[in-house]
Image: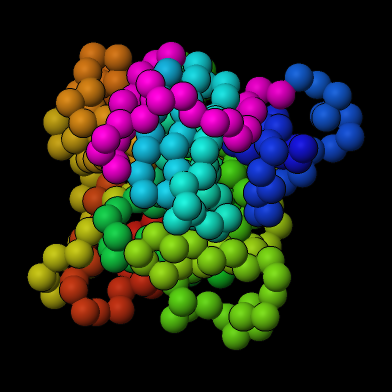
Amino acid sequence: MYYYKLYGMRVVSDFELLQLINLSEKERMLPPQITISERKFPEEYKRSEECYVDVGKERSIFSNSYCYMLMERGEAIYYEKKESSTEELLNAFLLGWGISVLFYQRDRLAIHCSCVQKDGEAILISGDSGSGKSTATSELLKHGYSLVADDIAVVRPFGEKGLLVAPAFPYQKICRDALPEDMWSSDRVVYIDENRDKFLVPYQGSFSEEEVLVRAMYILEIFPGEKAELKELAGGEKFRACMNSLFIKPLLGEKLYAPENGSRVLEFASRLPVYRIKRPVGKNTKMEVVDFINRQ
C-alpha cells in the first residue's frame, strides 16, 4: 500500500501515485480519510454505453473507455481497469474525476484552475483550455508566488467571509512544447494522455502543505480585441462564472443547478471577488495579466 497526503487528506492507495506527497510515519498511524483500491465490478455497475456517469452524494459511478470508478460517501474510490487503460491514464482519472467527485460528496468545491500564493494569500486562475492559465501561472511563479495546486483547487468556507484552499501536490501540468529540456530524461515527469499532450512536471520552488486564505479568483478569456481588459464580476454573471469553473461540471449534467450544488456555489461566490481578464487573441499579454493580478 501507498500512503499520501492530498488536499489536506490522508490517502491510502493500492495504486502508486508518483506525484503525491508521502505521509510521515506518524501520520500513517492515523486512520485514512480517503482510500483508493482496485476491485472487480459487479455487472450491476456496468452499462452497455462505453461512457457513463451518475453522480450522487452517497454513491457515484463513472465509466469510460479506460476504466470503471465507483466513489462512495466522500471516502473511497474503487476502480477496475479496462484493456485499453495505462498507468498514466488511470493516474489522471483517479486524481481528476475521482477526487473531484469525492469532494463533491464531502460538500467541498473542486475548482478547475491553477492556484498560487504570495504573502499568505492565494489566487485562483481559471479559464477554458487555451485561455492562458498555464502561461499566467508560470509567469506569476517567476514574480514571487509559489504553487498551491495546478488543474484542481479544493476550497472550503472559513469564518464568516473567508475561503481556504488546500494544497494539492508539487507538480505542474505543462504542454509538450513548453517542457524544459532538462526534464525530458527525468523519471519524475509523468505523461498525461488527455488529448492535449501534457506532462506532469515537478515544481522546483518551495511547496507548503498548509491551507491558505483565498484573495480572489481570475477567469481568463480570449477575445478579438486590441488590449487586455479587466472587469470585476457581480450578480448573476459572477454566479455563472463560478459555476462554470467547477471541475465536476461536465459530470453533473442536469444536477449542476440542483439546490444543494447551487447553494454551495452561491456561498463560494459570496466569499471572494471574481475578475474576468480578457486577453486579445494572438497577442502576448502575460505581463499585463500579472500586472492586473498584482494591482488588486
Magenta span covers which residues? 32-58
Residue 162 in view here: no
Point out the image quarter for the N terminus: top right
Query: Picture coordinates of residue 64 (x, y %)?
Result: 35, 44
**Residue farthest bottom in this picture:** 181
Query: Picture coordinates of residue 11 (x, y %)?
Result: 68, 32
Q: Is residue 186 left or right of residue 144?
A: right
Is residue 18 placed above or below 258 in the rendered structure?
below
Query: Picture coordinates of residue 165 (x, y %)?
Result: 53, 36
Residue 129 in view here: yes
**Residue farthest front in this picture:** 43
Q: In the image, is residue 150 part of the stretch drawn in magenta?
A: no
Count of numbered labels shown in the rendering: 0
Is residue 222 placed above or below 233 in the rendered structure?
below
Q: Is residue 154 left or right of residue 283?
A: right
* Residue at x 38% of width, y 72% of height: 287
* Residue at x 71% of width, y 32% of height: 12
Q: Is residue 54 left or right of residue 150?
A: left
> In which image quadrant can residue 216 be found?
top left
> In which image quadrant can residue 166 be found?
top right
> In which image quadrant can residue 144 be found?
bottom right
* Residue at x 53% of width, y 36% of height: 79
Q: Choose between 195 and 109: the one closer to the eye.
A: 195
Q: Is residue 79 left or right of residue 265?
A: right
Query: Picture coordinates of residue 60 (x, y %)?
Result: 40, 24
* Residue at x 30% of width, y 31% of height: 47
